């Protein structure tokens, strides 16, 4: 982009500060991991840098702490390869390092959050698609972006085949803890999981993907509390996710091509299953621990205006998930960022005892949380993606990132049922390519 506000300045490889003990070992990817092969993950942490902990990545302690934390994450510094026995993917722990790109942004942090489009935000993350020979290709990449006036955005990207959002968030938080000389809260855990069927259903890519756009809506604790109160009689134990998933699903259905009343509207819900299985997995589990399940509602129920019933349906669906279903690969119910509208739940990242989120507990300075965190999944086509995330102020507040075809998002952004909840709008702009 000739008129881009983001300028790439340099590229380097950061390796672990000392040889890793697992050098030479390999970690086989599960069938679920392999099923994510066409997707990428991109998480961007925005900081005002008021404590001036970031000056120059080349010289300051930020690079040193990254090298130090990488000694604990040999699968992050490794490279992908093919196992000789069955031809499956594996991560070879060869300590090859992580690609780090430095960039500068011709705007202040506040200006950027108010004016940048979703496609422009993509410039804050570094990514090169996996080549035919991935032996020297880094599946994890970090881009450090310096704003005018001192703000910083750190974008971390990886192939979805090697990790999910929860692992990426735990790794990033570990980096901040090492930087502050604190014990690591969620250390890495590398072990095979049970989702090891030889093949999982994969959705077919659309032949002519439409131009997609994104917008970010931030809802306050007071508003969410009022909304939960309104649906209390219908769904007394509703969570912020239940309400927001139901709200956006029902409103997006109105901007989609109309269906007959005897038809159904479907929502694919993506949930983390680390804590949903008997042999629970820790937050730092390396790999994918995601379950995709389908919820359908009659069109007439979606159009009735009775949001409480939809909230109750979402809540009941999630509460009814069984371990047997989680391990199931039933093609009739399985989807993976597929053709149906997908909604990602991140309620598990909010820790009730601390009323704190894993995403916003990542602090390089002693008192400075991120002012915003963006989470994106790459190569999603079909009907679109809703991501319901924790928000920077904690409590019941939530951030909702929506990716839809351009014309549909333009209509959704004017939806009165959403706007009457007075969301703060961030990074709502033009077309994502």
Image (cartoon, helix red, strand yellow):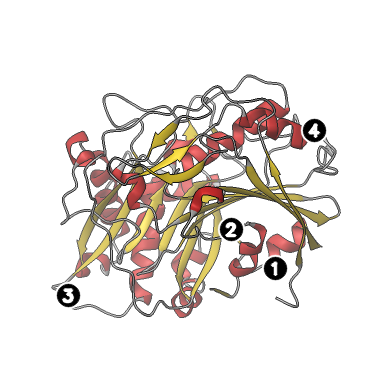
Mark 1, other Cα within 10 Å: few <14 / some 14–19 / many ≥20: some
- Of circles 1 and 4, the one toward us is 4
Instruction: Tell me the mark number nearer the camera, choosing from 3 and 1.
Output: 1
Q: Residues within 10 Å of mark 2 (few under 14, many from 20)?
A: many
Q: Residue extending furthest left?
A: 262
Where residue 109 sits: x, y (%)?
A: 76, 56
Contact check, label 2 and label 3, Cβ < 8 Å: no
Determine the secondary structure under disc 1: helix
Q: Nearer the viewer, mark 4 or mark 3?
A: 4
- Mark 4 and mark 3 lie on one chain; the one further toward the N terminus is 4
Q: Residue at x 38, y 80 (%)?
A: 208
* Residue located farthest toward the top when viewing the structure as drawn: 183
Cα distance between the residues tagged 1 and 4: 31 Å
Q: Which residue is mark 4?
A: 61
**What is the crowding at mark 4: few (fewer than 14 residues within 10 Å), some, or many (at least 20)?**
some
Q: Provide residue 331's location: percent of width, then percent of height.
A: 17, 55
The residue where tag 2 is placed is: 127
Mark 4 → mark 3, Cα distance in angstroms: 61 Å
Image coordinates for residue 200, horizontal then vertical, percent: 24, 51
Q: Nearer the viewer, residue 109 or 353?
A: 109
Q: Are marks 1 and 2 in contact (CB under 8 Å)?
A: no
Do we see residue 108 in this rendering? yes
Q: Earlier in the sequence, mark 2 or mark 4?
A: 4
Q: Residues within 10 Å of mark 3 (few under 14, many from 20)?
A: few
Residue 114 horizontal side relative to residue 387, left or right: right
């Amino acid at each position: 982009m000739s008129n881009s506000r983001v300028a790439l300045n340099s590229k380097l490889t950061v390796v672990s500060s000392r040889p890793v003990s697992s050098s030479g070992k390999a970690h086989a990817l599960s069938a679920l991991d392999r099923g994510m092969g066409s997707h990428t993950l991109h998480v961007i942490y925005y900081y005002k840098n008021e404590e001036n902990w970031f000056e120059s990545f080349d010289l300051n302690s930020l690079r040193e702490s990254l090298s130090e934390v990488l000694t604990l994450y040999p699968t992050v510094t490794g490279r992908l390869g093919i196992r000789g026995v069955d031809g499956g993917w594996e991560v070879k722990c060869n300590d090859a390092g992580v690609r780090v790109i430095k960039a500068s942004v011709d705007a202040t942090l506040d200006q950027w959050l108010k004016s940048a489009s979703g496609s422009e935000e993509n410039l804050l993350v570094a990514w090169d698609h996996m080549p035919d020979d991935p032996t020297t290709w880094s599946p994890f990449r970090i881009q450090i972006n310096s704003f005018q006036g001192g703000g910083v955005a750190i974008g971390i990207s990886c192939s979805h085949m090697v990790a999910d959002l929860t692992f990426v968030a735990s790794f990033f938080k570990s980096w901040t803890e090492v930087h502050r000389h604190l014990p690591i809260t969620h250390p890495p855990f590398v072990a095979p999981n049970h989702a090891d069927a030889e093949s999982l259903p994969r959705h077919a890519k659309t032949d002519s993907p439409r131009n997609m756009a994104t917008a970010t809506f931030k809802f306050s604790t007071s508003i969410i509390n009022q909304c939960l109160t309104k649906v209390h009689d219908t769904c007394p134990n509703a969570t912020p996710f239940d309400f927001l998933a139901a709200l956006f699903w029902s409103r997006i259905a109105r901007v989609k091509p109309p269906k007959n009343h005897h038809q159904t509207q479907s929502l694919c819900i993506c949930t983390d299953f680390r804590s949903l299985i008997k042999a629970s997995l820790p937050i730092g589990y390396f790999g994918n621990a995601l379950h995709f399940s389908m919820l359908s509602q009659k069109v007439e129920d979606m159009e009735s205006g009775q949001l409480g019933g939809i909230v109750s349906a979402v809540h009941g669906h999630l509460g009814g998930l069984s371990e047997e279903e989680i391990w199931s690969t039933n093609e009739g119910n399985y989807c993976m960022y597929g053709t149906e509208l997908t909604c990602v739940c991140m309620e598990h990242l909010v820790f009730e005892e601390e009323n704190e989120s894993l995403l916003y507990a990542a602090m390089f300075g002693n008192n400075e949380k991120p002012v915003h965190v963006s989470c994106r999944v790459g190569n999603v086509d079909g009907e679109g993606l809703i991501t319901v995330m924790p928000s920077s102020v904690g409590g019941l507040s939530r951030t909702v990132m929506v990716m839809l075809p351009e014309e549909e998002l333009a209509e959704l952004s004017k939806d009165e049922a959403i706007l009457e909840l007075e969301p703060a709008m961030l990074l709502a702009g033009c077309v994502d390519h």
